[in-house]
Image (tube, helix red, strand yellow):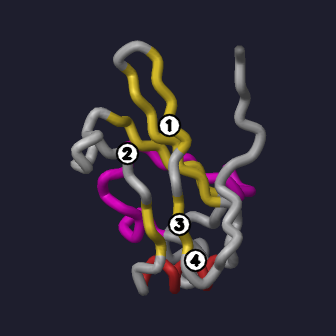
């Protein structure tokens, strides 16, 4: 039976956010797909700064992190483009995201 992902990453609590991945497996390939729908950029930055985002990571049955997953984040936020773009308060910087993410796909971009 085929299953499709229609929408994921909805954030219902903007005071504290838990981001759980959709886990995909095919053969030996393992992907953890994280999603974050649009949150006001200032509020999202406050969540990041205050470490109020709980990133749920794939674990082995022993409870240890499963390092075999390729971690992808899909997010609908403004990306910081330097001094000629958005301010750091009205956008998200690469450095503010967890370093263990392997790939970040940005939505909400209106310029090429």
Region rendered in magenta: 93-112
> What residue is disc 3 on?
18
Percent position of residue 74, x then y: 58, 49
Q: Quadrant of the N terminus?
A: top right
Between label 4 and label 1, give the one nearer the viewer: 1
Q: CA distance from mark 4 to mark 1?
A: 24 Å
Residue appearing at x 55%, y 72% in the figure: 17
Q: Residues within 10 Å of mark 3 (few under 14, many from 20)?
A: some
Query: In the picture shown, does residue 14 fall above or below 22?
Result: below
Task: Work out whether mark 4 precedes mark 2 in sequence or the reverse, and give the earlier one.
Answer: 4
Residue appearing at x 25%, y 40% in the figure: 67
Q: Are marks 2 and 1 in contact (CB under 8 Å)?
A: yes
Q: Is residue 111 magenta?
A: yes
> What residue is disc 2 on?
58
Q: Which mark is residue 44?
A: 4
Task: Work out whether mark 3 precedes mark 2 in sequence or the reverse, and give the earlier one.
Answer: 3
Q: Residues within 10 Å of mark 1 (few under 14, many from 20)?
A: some
Residue appearing at x 51%, y 30% in the figure: 24
> What residue is disc 1 on?
23
Q: Residues within 10 Å of mark 2 (few under 14, many from 20)?
A: many
């Amino acid at each position: 039976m085929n299953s499709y992902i229609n929408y994921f990453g909805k954030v219902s609590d903007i005071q504290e956010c838990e981001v759980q991945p959709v886990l995909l497996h095919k053969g030996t390939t393992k992907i953890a797909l994280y999603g974050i729908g649009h949150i006001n950029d200032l509020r999202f930055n406050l969540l990041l700064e205050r470490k109020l985002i709980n990133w749920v990571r794939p674990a082995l049955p022993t409870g240890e992190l499963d390092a075999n997953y390729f971690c992808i984040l899909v997010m609908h936020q403004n990306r910081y483009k330097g001094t000629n773009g958005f301010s750091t308060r009205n956008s998200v910087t690469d450095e503010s995201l967890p370093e263990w993410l392997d790939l970040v796909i940005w939505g909400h971009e209106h310029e090429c």
